[in-house]
Amino acid sequence: MQFKITVNGKATNVDVPEDMPLLWVLRDVLHLNGTKYGCGIGQCGACMVHVNGRPARSCLTSISSAANAKVVTIEGLSIDGSHPLQVAWKDVDVPQCGYCQAGQIMSAAALLATNVNPTDKDIDNALDGNLCRCGTYLRIRHAVHAAAKIKRESTKKTAPKTTSSGSKKRQ
Ligand code: FES
Ligand code: FES
């Protein structure tokens, strides 16, 4: 069956069974191998992607339910590794074996899209469904805080300057 799907900004058609998990479409049909298969039953978060801007476990998302959706995978976060999470992940040197990390980063990206000043609790809640058998949780939390700071600072730099009365200053 034909399905249209937009992955990392690129619209594409796939011809697959309607119950095929999005995870297999991404990995086996579109050859985007950054998204990982961990448990296949929604328990580990290794397969996390964004579907229409929300985090989704691609092992539990059928292609028919993702038809016409906009999907973002770890490969689509930035083309040059410049996303604040990618920068912070490198600075903090988060990964150990690395297997869970794409899913962790995608959950963190969904959090930072709506909250650029998360508390430890916000981070723990947002990444609650992402397991790391290597136990990198503290470094993950540290990196999410670091990424949030990068994001806040870059937003400040690009925000229009205001005068003391609060009106926008002409550039
Ligand atoms: S592979 Fe999808 S949640 Fe584990
Ligand atoms: S870094 Fe090994 S499972 Fe998380």
Image (tube, grey):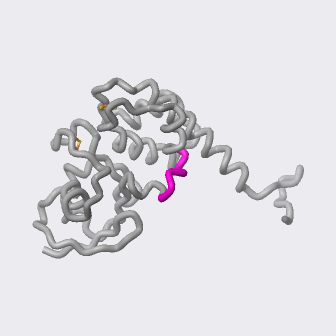
* Residue 145: quadrant of the picture: top right
Nearer to us in this view, 30 or 118 = 30
**Which quadrant does the C terminus fall into?**
bottom right
Q: Residue at x 36, y 44 (%)?
A: 102
- Residue 132 screen position, x and y as percent: 31, 30
Q: Decide: is 130 above or below 69.
A: above
Q: Is residue 82 magenta?
A: yes
Where is residue 82 drawn, in percent x and y? 54, 51
Q: Is residue 45 left or right of residue 2?
A: right
Which residue shows up at 41% across the image and 68% down it?
9
**Quadrant of the displayed image that contains ligand 1:** top left
Q: Is residue 19 left or right of residue 124?
A: left
Q: Quadrant of the N terminus?
A: bottom left
Q: Residue at x 29, y 50 (%)?
A: 35
| Magenta segment, prevailing SS (helix, strand or loop) | loop
Quadrant of the image occupied by residue 6: bottom left
Image coordinates for residue 12, horizontal then vertical, percent: 30, 73
> Relative to the observer, which residue lies in front, 52 or 15?
15
Q: Is residue 29 left or right of residue 114?
A: left
In the foreground, 138 or 64? 138
Look at the image and give the residue range highlighted in magenta: 79-84
Please, is residue 149 above or below residue 63 in the view? above
